[in-house]
């Protein structure tokens, strides 16, 4: 081929027909794709770490981060001498994540065996709660027993620290203290009244859990726990036990339905003992009847019977119309017909003419009714109210009753007469004890308190002189010739009053059912303690207040005086045959040869 042909011939192409993009273009394409992908990854990372960071953080925390409560111990309750009455003991509750346990269903039988329950029932329990993150398997196990369950190593099963309330005195202090529920919240008694003070505030902490549900790290404390505060009561455990044991023994002997006793320090209003029977075990509340858990000393009311005559006499002396020895009151032959009713005294042949002191000593219904009727109605009503009848004592005990005292303007003459000797109104044992403590304290009324050192300033209700005269008059009730000689305490002078009242029934009064009462002050010459005993519906042996309730007072108070180291009354008074009768003794009557108990309320007209 010549040069001309070669020059005219087409030159071969540098790339074959059908070949792809050049290397340069391919590199640019790859770089572009990688750049877009990188931008996508950056955008995605920005979305995850910035835009939706909190959402994914929360999702992760939901799986591994938990806020757990920090249990706190409930405050200890002490008696006035520092003896523990209610303490909290550490326990462990077994908890679980139901779904995690169900994922290991083959291990449920081992878990059930460790818990002491049925495997099928446990599985059914878990299946019903499969959508939950938390469930209890067993509450408040001892640490040793709980550790045995946790040692099985079931995924999703954990232990949670808790506290359980324990009452060392059991039934003896049950009604005063009450009890707590399984979550350690007060349900009755002082546990309920002071729940906020005792309970404290649980803390909280944030923890990390592994897939087995075990805590592997404490992250932070959300807020610190605040343990409950301790509480020191006015209750003296020794006197409380005396009251419980003596009252229980008497109820058993008499086959009585129930009984109550209150002991007060008259100078402060502090409650040294408060017992209500029947009782229950606060360490095992389940199964106990509701009636047994009721603190009858503050929730139940009784007609006070002849114990009310003391306050009728307080009004009489305060009115200026009467003194302890005059004027004389004619009680006749033991029957006085007034407004179609026969008001009766139990003394055979009647009591004749009595001084006001003699009306109390002989517990004359007729004498009390005549004295009451002679007084201005509003003045008599105001006197009763001043002693606290018809209103709550203010002790702060949950469910406390105010009793019943109808306004004086609604009293008919027959109601005024019967109220003067204790029918037609209702009082609680604590109200009655507070009223007698007011007399013993020179007419100064204190609000009863369960807290040591919780006394208020007190309010003067009647003059100190009249209060002293009334205490002197009440000495004759326990002296020879009085209606409550069984309340006498060796080397001490007791002032007090018995009462025996029919039980209300079906709009009237039960013929053979009674409340038997005794309210006493000791030592009478320098009062320190007041005790009130109420026994409801005794069915054996006797039912008069001086026979049924006065001996309980004698046994408990003699022990209390020794425990508190209270000095005896003026010993010289005992060398002349017993304590002197106040106000010159009885007028118009001679001391009987045989002591006769107060039956006046029993024989009284039913209003």
Image: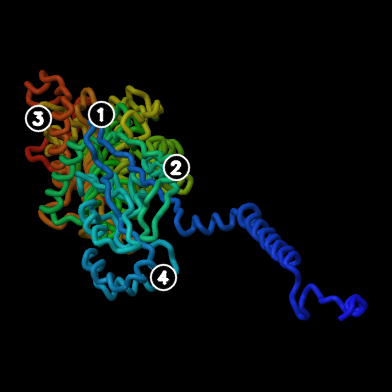
Circle 3 packing at 10 Å, graded few (<14), some (14-19), many (20+), is: few
| Numbered circle sitting on residue 221 | 2
Q: Give the residue pinned by disc 4.
A: 130
Asked where in the image residue 20 lies, by quadrant, the reply is bottom right
- x 21%, y 32%: residue: 495
Tag nearer the camera, 1 or 4:
4
Q: Is residue 3 above or below residue 210?
A: below
Residue sticking out furthest to the front: 2
Residue 229 image point, x, y percent: 36, 36
Side of 256 relative to 406 (left or right): left
Residue 572 in view: yes
The CA distance from mark 4 to mark 2 is: 29 Å
Circle 4 packing at 10 Å, graded few (<14), some (14-19), many (20+), is: some
The CA distance from mark 3 to mark 2 is: 64 Å
Side of 460 relative to 109 (left or right): right
| Numbered circle sitting on residue 490 | 3
Circle 1 packing at 10 Å, graded few (<14), some (14-19), many (20+), is: many
Side of 270 relative to 36 (left or right): left
The CA distance from mark 3 to mark 1 is: 18 Å
Residue 391 in view: no
**Sequence-wise, which precedes: disc 3 or disc 2?**
2
Residue 40 image point, x, y percent: 67, 61
Q: How is the image coloured?
A: rainbow
Q: Are marks 4 and 3 in contact (CB under 8 Å)?
A: no
Label 3, secondary structure: give it. loop
Residue 6 image point, x, y percent: 88, 77
| Numbered circle sitting on residue 471 | 1
Residue situated in front as seen by the camera: 374 or 91:
91
Q: Quadrant of the N terminus?
A: bottom right
């Amino acid at each position: 081929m010549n040069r001309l042909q070669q020059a005219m011939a087409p030159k071969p192409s540098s790339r074959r027909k059908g070949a792809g993009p050049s290397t340069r273009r391919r590199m640019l394409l790859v770089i572009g794709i990688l750049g877009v992908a990188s931008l996508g990854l950056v955008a995605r990372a920005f979305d995850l770490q910035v835009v939706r960071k909190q959402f994914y953080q929360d999702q992760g925390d939901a799986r591994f981060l938990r806020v757990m409560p920090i249990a706190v111990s409930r405050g200890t309750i002490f008696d006035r001498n520092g003896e523990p009455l209610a303490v909290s003991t550490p326990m462990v509750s077994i908890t679980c994540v139901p779904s995690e346990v169900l994922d290991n269903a083959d291990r449920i039988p081992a878990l059930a065996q460790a818990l002491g329950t049925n495997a099928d029932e446990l599985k059914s329990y878990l299946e019903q709660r499969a959508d939950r993150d938390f469930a209890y398997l067993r509450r408040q196990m001892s640490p040793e027993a709980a550790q045995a369950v946790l040692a099985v190593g079931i995924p999703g099963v954990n232990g949670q620290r808790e506290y359980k309330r324990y009452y060392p005195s059991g039934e003896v202090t049950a009604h005063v203290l009450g009890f707590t529920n399984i979550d350690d919240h007060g349900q009755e008694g002082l546990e309920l009244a002071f729940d906020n003070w005792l309970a404290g505030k649980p803390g909280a902490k944030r923890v990390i859990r592994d897939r087995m549900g075990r805590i592997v790290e404490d992250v932070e404390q959300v807020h610190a726990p605040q343990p409950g505060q301790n509480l020191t009561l006015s209750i003296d455990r020794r006197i409380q036990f005396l009251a419980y044991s003596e009252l229980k023994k008497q109820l058993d002997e008499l086959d009585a339905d129930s009984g109550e006793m209150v002991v007060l320090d008259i100078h402060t209003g502090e409650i040294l003992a408060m017992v209500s029977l029947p009782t229950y075990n606060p360490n095992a509340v389940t199964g106990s009847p509701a009636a047994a858990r009721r603190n009858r000393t503050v929730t139940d009311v009784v007609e006070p019977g002849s114990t009310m005559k003391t306050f009728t006499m307080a009004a009489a002396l305060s009115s200026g119309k009467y003194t302890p020895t005059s004027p004389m009151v004619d009680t006749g032959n033991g029957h006085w017909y007034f407004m179609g009713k026969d008001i009766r005294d139990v003394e055979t042949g009647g009591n004749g003419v009595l001084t006001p002191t003699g009306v109390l000593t002989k517990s004359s219904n007729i004498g009390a009714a005549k004295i009451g009727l002679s007084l201005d109605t509003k003045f008599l009503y105001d006197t009763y109210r001043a002693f606290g009848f018809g209103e709550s004592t203010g002790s702060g005990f949950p469910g406390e009753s105010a009793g019943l005292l109808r306004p004086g303007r609604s009293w008919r003459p027959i109601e005024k007469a019967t109220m003067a000797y204790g029918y037609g109104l209702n009082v609680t044992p604590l109200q009655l004890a507070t009223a007698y403590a007011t007399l013993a304290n020179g007419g100064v009324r204190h609000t009863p308190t369960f807290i040591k050192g919780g006394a208020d300033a007190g309010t003067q209700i009647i003059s100190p002189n009249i209060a002293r005269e009334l205490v002197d008059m009440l000495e004759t009730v326990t002296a020879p010739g009085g209606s409550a000689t069984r309340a006498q305490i060796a080397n001490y002078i007791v002032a007090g009053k018995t009462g025996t009242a029919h039980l209300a029934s079906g709009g009237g009064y039960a013929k053979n059912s009674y409340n038997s009462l005794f309210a006493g002050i000791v030592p009478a010459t320098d009062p320190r303690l007041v005790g009130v005993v109420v026994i409801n519906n005794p069915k054996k042996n006797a039912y008069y207040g001086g026979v049924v309730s006065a001996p309980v007072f004698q046994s408990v108070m003699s022990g209390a005086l020794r425990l508190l180291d209270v000095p005896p009354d003026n010993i010289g008074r005992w060398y002349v045959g017993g304590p002197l009768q106040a106000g010159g003794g009885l007028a118009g009557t001679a001391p009987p040869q045989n002591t006769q108990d107060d039956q006046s309320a029993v024989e009284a007209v039913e209003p």
